[in-house]
Image: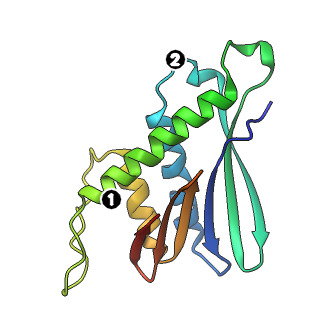
């Protein structure tokens, strides 16, 4: 069983370093998992569906579980709560970061004990141009500038 509720990650269709995409996907999965609040998170899995729409790679992340009787987990509600928690933590982290200056970015440095949100954000910025979206919340990086809508 796979939920309909999802997070959408969009990247321009171009060549990327495998390590960049691998790191981005791992850090995104870890950040979403870190945001889960339910003890039932062990019975759910995070799935990815990859598509190409025009000149954009589209990654759709959804929670799934083996069967309906695996737990009492309402998958749609679970997905909505956890994706919403993740995207709100991401927005709060972006808003708490230093603003870009005339001399370039003054972003926080990644420390060994940084939260997974910070690690994902660092990987996300590195792409230069990307979008992550959940419902009506959208975060876009364009030419290394961030836009929130």
Residue nearer the viewer, 78 or 61: 78
Dividing the picture into quadrants, the one containing residue 78 is top right
- In space, the residues marked 1 and 2 are separated at their CA atoms by 28 Å
Q: Earlier in the sequence, mark 1 or mark 2?
A: 2
Q: Is residue 126 left or right of residue 19?
A: left
Q: Position of residue 26 (x, y in %)?
A: 53, 50
| Residue farthest toward the bottom in the current orientation of the protein | 102
Q: Is residue 139 above or below residue 101?
A: above
Residue 13: give its label: none
Q: Residue at x 65, y 21 (%)?
A: 43
Q: Residues within 10 Å of mark 2 (few under 14, many from 20)?
A: few
Instruction: Where is residue 44? Give x, y as percent.
Output: 65, 27
Residue at image position (69%, 13%) is: 71
Q: Please give left or right for residue 9 compared with residue 86 in the image.
A: right
**Residue at the (66%, 18%) spot, across then down:** 73
Q: How is the image coloured?
A: rainbow
For discs 1 and 2, the disc positioned in front in the rendered view: 1
Q: Residues within 10 Å of mark 1 (few under 14, many from 20)?
A: some
Q: Is residue 57 above or below residue 64?
A: below
Q: Nearer the viewer, residue 12 or 109?
A: 12
Disc assigned to residue 94: 1
Q: Secondary structure at mark 2?
A: helix
What x and y, as percent, mark residue 102?
19, 87
Q: Are marks 1 and 2 in contact (CB under 8 Å)?
A: no
Q: Which residue is mark 2?
A: 39
Classify mark 1: helix, strand or loop: helix
Which residue is pictured at 51% across the width and 58% down the height? 23
Q: Residue 1 location, x and y as percent?
A: 80, 30
């Amino acid at each position: 069983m796979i939920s309909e509720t999802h997070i959408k990650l969009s990247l321009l269709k171009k060549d990327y370093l495998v390590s960049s995409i691998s790191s981005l996907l791992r850090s995104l999965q870890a950040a979403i998992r870190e945001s889960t609040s339910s003890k039932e998170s062990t019975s759910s899995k995070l799935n990815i569906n990859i598509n190409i729409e025009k000149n954009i790679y589209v990654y759709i992340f959804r929670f799934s579980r083996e069967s309906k009787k695996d737990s009492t987990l309402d998958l749609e509600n679970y997905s909505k709560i956890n994706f919403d928690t993740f995207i709100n933590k991401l927005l709060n982290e972006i808003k708490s970061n230093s603003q870009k200056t005339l001399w370039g970015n003054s972003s926080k440095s990644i420390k060994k004990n940084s939260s997974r949100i910070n690690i994902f954000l660092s990987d996300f910025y590195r792409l230069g141009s990307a979008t992550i979206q959940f419902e009506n919340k959208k975060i876009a990086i364009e030419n290394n500038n961030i836009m929130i809508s």
